[in-house]
Image (spheres, grey):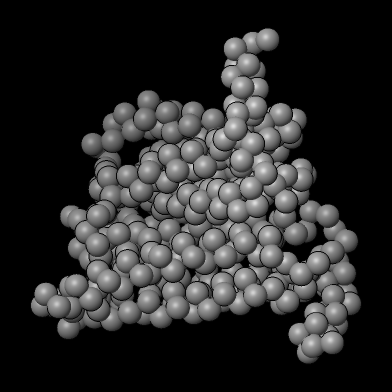
């Protein structure tokens, strides 16, 4: 067995995973925290993306917008990862068999790649256009792609709930 | 049978309800739109509250932050009422016969009052050169707003777990 599979199996067999599975309150409570976190991640990223697209917040330089908003995004992302991880280990093998779950993970990775591409390519000459109302095309593309990817992440998340029965 | 149960039964028999019930992608699609709306509204409220509490965007003037994030509240609220309304029409008993749903609506009313409160204590011209008491009041309103918004999202998730059989 591969190390990753062994680790997932170990987590699913743990007493923590069992309590999340069995307890009536714990699973919906973790889901609630997960929804709060995801909403903050998506909502705050949208604000930055709209600035990248030159559609909102244009009176402020991009740098100031990201410094003001992204700390919230990262805190919320950590919370989403923690709560999502706990939900995952409660029924790990069932989640891994669910196509929407796998798609959701791949889409989040794609959003990460999109962000890395922006830092590598789009933001290379950032000081030159930081204050511009309309950022150059590569930056606008990053913003647009990001919005589409996160909409797809939310949709997959919701579809997981309709294609597998856990926790109830 | 109670009036609400009667009404739910009537609503569930309407053609629109029937369409939502029998098209398998309809409910998750409407829920996705609903959550995206919640994400925008909730994040806007949180960003304003965190600015009032001086935890984020401290170097951005307060009016700039509220001018950016408060106006989206109303159009997004309309989207939420439409998508939420469609979800009720699709599964009336799930919410209309569910006390969690009414808790969520009460919290929503409270959140809107608190948003108006933030407007009053923070944004109005009189609040600009506000004294200490006014600033403490603004902080209290912002903290309450954060808690109530989280309560709305928790109640929203809990509707699925407390629905009538």
With B45 as the anchor, is B59 left or right in this view? Answer: left
Q: Is residue A167 above or below residue A56?
A: above
Q: Position of residue A14 (x, y in %)?
A: 60, 29
Q: Is residue B154 above or below residue B130?
A: above
Q: Is residue B82 visible?
A: no
Q: Position of residue A73 (x, y in %)?
A: 39, 45
Residue at position x 26%, y 54% in the image: B56
Give B67 or B146, whichever is nearer the viewer: B146
Q: Is residue A117 visible?
A: yes
Residue at position x 22%, y 59% in the image: B54
Residue at position x 77%, y 74% in the image: B92
With A69 as the anchor, is B53 left or right in this view? Answer: left
Give A105 or A165, whichever is nearer the viewer: A165
Quarter of the image holding residue A110? Answer: top right
Single out the residue that lies furthest toward the bottom.
B3
Residue at position x 55%, y 44% in the image: A150
| Number of marks drawn | 0
Q: Is residue A29 above or below residue B14?
A: above
The image quadrant where one finds the N terminus of chain A is: top right
Q: Position of residue A122 (x, y in %)?
A: 38, 32
Q: Position of residue A162 (x, y in %)?
A: 76, 49
Quarter of the image holding residue B85? Answer: bottom right
With A48 as the anchor, is A24 left or right in this view? Answer: right
């Amino acid at each position: 067995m591969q190390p990753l599979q062994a680790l997932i199996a170990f987590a699913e067999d743990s007493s923590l995973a069992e309590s999340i599975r069995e307890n009536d309150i714990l699973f919906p409570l973790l889901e609630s925290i997960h929804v709060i976190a995801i909403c903050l991640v998506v909502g705050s990223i949208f604000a930055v993306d709209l600035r990248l697209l030159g559609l909102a917040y244009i009176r402020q330089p991009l740098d100031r917008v990201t410094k003001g908003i992204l700390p919230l995004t990262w805190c919320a992302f950590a919370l989403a990862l923690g709560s999502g991880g706990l939900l995952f280990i409660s029924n790990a093998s069932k989640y891994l068999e669910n196509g929407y779950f796998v798609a959701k993970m791949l889409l989040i990775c794609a959003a990460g790649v999109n962000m890395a591409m922006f830092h590598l390519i789009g933001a290379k000459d950032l000081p030159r256009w930081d204050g511009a109302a309309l950022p150059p095309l590569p930056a606008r593309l990053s913003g647009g792609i990001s919005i589409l990817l996160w909409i797809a992440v939310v949709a997959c998340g919701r579809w997981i709930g309709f294609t597998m029965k856990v926790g109830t | 049978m109670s009036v609400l149960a009667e009404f739910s039964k009537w609503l569930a028999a309407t053609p629109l309800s029937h369409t939502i019930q029998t098209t398998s992608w309809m409910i998750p699609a409407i829920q996705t739109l609903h959550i995206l709306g919640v994400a925008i509204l909730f994040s806007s409220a949180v960003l304003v509250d965190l600015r009032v509490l001086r935890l984020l965007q401290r170097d951005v003037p307060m009016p700039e932050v509220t001018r950016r994030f408060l106006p989206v509240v109303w159009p997004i609220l309309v989207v939420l009422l439409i998508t939420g309304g469609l979800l009720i029409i699709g599964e009336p008993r799930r919410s209309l016969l569910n006390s969690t749903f009414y808790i969520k609506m009460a919290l929503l009313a409270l959140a809107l009052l608190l948003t108006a409160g933030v407007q009053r204590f923070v944004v109005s011209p009189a609040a600009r050169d506000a004294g200490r008491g006014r600033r403490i009041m603004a902080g209290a309103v912002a903290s309450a707003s954060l808690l109530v918004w989280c309560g709305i999202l928790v109640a929203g998730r809990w509707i699925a777990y407390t629905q009538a059989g």
